[in-house]
Amino acid sequence: MSEKNIKEKPMPDYNELIQQRFKKLDEIRGKGINPYSGRYEATSRAQDLHDSYDNATKEDLEKNRVEVSLAGRIIAMRSFGKAAFSHIQDGSGKLQVYFQKNTLGEDRYGLFKKLDIGDFIGVKGFLFRTKTDELTVEVEDFVLLTKSLRPLPEKWHGLTDTEIRYRQRYVDLIVNPDVKKVFLLRTRIIQAVRAFLASREYLEVETPMMQTIPGGAAAKPFKTHHNALGMDLFLRIAPELYLKRLLVGGFERVFEINRNFRNEGISTWHNPEFTMLEFYTAYADYRDLMDMTEELISSVAREVIGTTEITYEGMSISLAPPWKRLSFIDSLREAGVSDDVLTNEDKARAHAKKLGANLKGGEPLGKLLNELFEALVEPNIVQPTFITDYPTDISPLSKKREDNPDIVERFELFVGGKELANAFSELNDPVDQKERFMKQLAEREAGDEEAHQMDADFVRALEYGMPPAAGEGIGIDRLVMLLTGSSSIRDVILFPQMKKEKA
C-alpha cells in the first residue's frame, strides 16, 4: 500500500500524534531528504565513550579534542529555541548530545526541529562537559537514518501493561532497560552452558523438530500435515529418542539446546513453545548426572551473575553444592503420607481425590503417588533438591533399579517450588522397552492422551545395542527465570505465545 493510501485509509489507531509524524515525513521528503537512509559508519558506542571518558575533566576534553561518530535512537529531547539537548540510545547504552543552531546552520537546525523521540540518527561531533558536568557530544553534523511514525509510550520508563509488553516486545525492549538486560543475560547463560559441555567433550547436534511419532516425554503434541509426503507429522515434544539413537550410532556424549512444543496449558512456568537442554552420556548413570548438574548450574551462576546466592520471589536460595538428595517415597513420608497410602492403590486414589486431583480411573499406583507428590511436596521445595527413585509406572524410558523393579534410576531437580531438570539412567533393554511402550499404549486406549506412543524404530535401534548411559533435560527458560529473578516464563521468552489481538 502506498503512503498516499495509508493516509487516505488510516489504521484504526492512527491518532493525531501519528498523523503529525506523517506530516513531518512528507515535509522531510519535500526537502529531498531520504528519511530511511542506508549505511552509517558509527565509530563510537555510547558505553565505550562512558568507559573511556567519564573520568575525563572538562579541561581534559577541551585540551584533547575527542571526535566521535555515534548512531542510535532519540529517547529524550529538551529544546531551548536555538539549542537543544537530546539523549540517543544505541545497543550499548545512552549518551547526551547537544544541537546548536549556530553550529549547524539554519537549514540543518530546521531539519533537527522535525525530529521526534523514537527517530534514529547518526551524529558527528566532539565530547565536552556541560555546566552540570554531564558527558555530552556537541553535534557538528547529523543524518536522519529512520523516521519513527509511532511515538514511544509517554512515560517511557513505565510500560507496565503485561499484555502490551509481551505482544509488542520491540517497544518493551526500547523503553525498559531491565527487560533488555534479562535477554542479554539469557544469551550469556546459554553460551556458558554450551562452553561447559564443550569443555567436557560433548558434541552439539541437531535432531528433527517434525516427527512421525512424538516421543521422549508425556505430553500432548501439535499436529501438522506434510503435503509432499502425504503424511501427518508432529512438532517434537522432546528430542530424547533421537539423541539416544546417536548413542547407538557411536557418539558417546551428545547434547542439544532445543525448541520443544507441547499442546498444553499456559502458566507462569509453562509456554507451549520452550527451550530445553538435553544431554546424554554413555557409560554413566543418574548418580553421575547429579554431580554434573550441581557443577553445571553453580558454575553458570558464578560466571554469569557472579554468585551462587540468589533471591527468587522472596526466597533466599543457595546454588552452591552439595544439594539435598531425597527419594520420592521418603519425600512423601516427610510430607505426612502414611505407608498404607504409599502401598495401597485404593487409599492413594482416595487421598489424591481429596487433594483435588483430576482422575479418570484406572491410574496405576505410581501415577496416583505422583499426584500426591505434586500437591504436597513439590511446591514446598525451596533449596535445590534432587528427588530420586521414581515409580516405574511414570517412567517409561528409565532403567529399573536392580534391587527393586518397581522404581527406576531417575531424579528430578526442584528449586523454588518448581521442577528444573529431569534425568535418569537410560533403559537400554529393548525387550523391557517394548513392554513398557505396550503398557503406555494401553493407558492411551484408556483415555490418557499424554501416554507414550509405540516407537518401533526406537526399539529396533535398541536391538542393535545402546551402551549403558544417563540422560538429562534442563529447562533453559526456567533456569533463566531463576538466575534473573523473573516471576513468569513470558518474561524470559522474547515472543511468547499470545491470544489473537482484538481488532
Image: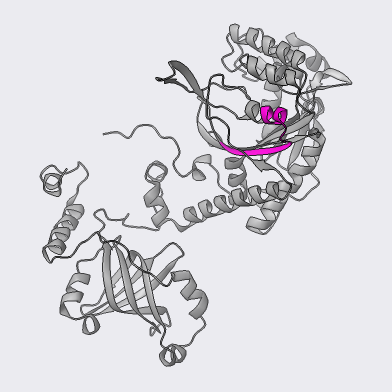
The answer to whether 498 is drawn above or below residue 84 in the figure is: above
Q: Is residue 374 left or right of residue 450?
A: right
Residue 203 figure quarter: top right
Q: Which residue corresponds to the image point at 16% horizontal and 44% vertical from the top-left?
A: 10
Residue 287 figure quarter: top right
Magenta segment includes 229: no
Relative image position of residue 380 (x, y in whole percent):
70, 35
The answer to whether 330 is drawn above or below residue 162 in the figure is: above
Does the rendering let one see residue 176?
A: yes
Residue 258 figure quarter: top right
Front residue (pair 354, 87): 87
Q: Which residue corresponds to the image point at 53% horizontal and 27% vertical from the top-left?
A: 262
- Quadrant location, the N terminus: top left
Does the rendering let one see residue 318?
A: no
Relative image position of residue 201 (x, y in whole percent):
72, 46
Q: Which residue corresponds to the image point at 74% horizontal and 47% vertical from the top-left?
A: 200
- Quadrant location, the C terminus: top left
Task: State the colouring used for the structure image.
Answer: one colour
Relative image position of residue 17 (x, y in whole percent):
20, 55
Relative image position of residue 101 (x, y in whole percent):
21, 81
Q: Is residue 341 left or right of residue 157?
A: right
Q: Is residue 221 left or right of residue 335?
A: left
Magenta segment includes 246: yes
The mark tally for this picture is 0
Start-end of magenta stretch: 244-258
